[in-house]
Image (spheres, helix red, strand yellow):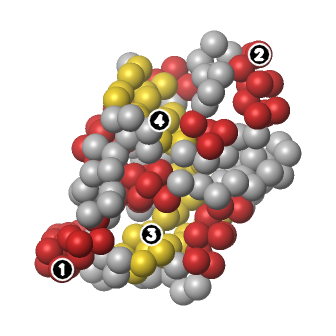
Amino acid sequence: MAVLSTSGMTRRALLGAFAATTVAAAPTFSNAAGFLRGGGDIRRIRMYSGRTGERIDMIYWIEGKYIKDAVKEVNYFMRDWRTDGVKTMDLRTIDIMAAAHNLMDANEPYMLLSGYRSPKTNAMLRSRSRGVAKNSLHMKGQAADLRLSSRSVHQMAKAAIACRGGGVGKYSGSNFVHMDCGVVRNWGR
């Protein structure tokens, strides 16, 4: 899959292009939980994992359609690295992540701290921390914990909250933001 290069194109030009195509793409959002501002007609996700050393820079959606092979790669990238378990990630979560990234105008990829978590991994983490939910959306492939070194937890959370697509948790002490496609809510400081 070719990576979209936006070098030489300004943010304003990109946003103008996205805005111009939003009206034409509106019917594709009829089944979505909410319109994800900043999503655009091309959706791209950029992440790296400090645990595995892997990187992904993937266009996964073009003109109203998810790209099957790209989504498969995203699912693998977001696997439970402890067990190597792969789960089909809920695409609404990926959309929230991509839209928030666009809204922040960040050039760096997200650092993925946690995507899918097997029940075994979730139980282990729960035994070590009160902040891990027993029925975590991570186990359903509906959540991600992310970090950006160029943006604060507050800035990341603000962008994700603006998407109005799910839950957003600020974990300032651990320097990450939780994004999920569950009920729209937010928490943390």
State which tag comes first along the sequence, 3 or 4: 3
Taking the view exactly as shown, the residue that stands out farthest to the right is: 83
How far apart, in angstroms, are the residues tagged by discs 2 and 3?
35 Å
Circle 1 SS class: helix
Circle 3 SS class: strand
Nearer to us in this view, 156 or 63: 63
Say which amino acid is labelled 2: Ser
Q: Quadrant of residue 169?
A: top left
| Residue behind mark 2 | 127
Say which amino acid is labelled 4: Val
How far apart, in angstroms, are the residues tagged by discs 1 and 2?
49 Å
How far apart, in angstroms, are the residues tagged by discs 4 and 2?
21 Å
| Residue behind mark 4 | 177
Numbered mark located on residue 24 in the image: 1
Q: Is residue 88 left or right of residue 153?
A: right
Nearer mark to the viewer, of 2 and 3: 2
Taking the view exactly as shown, the residue that stands out farthest to the front is: 31
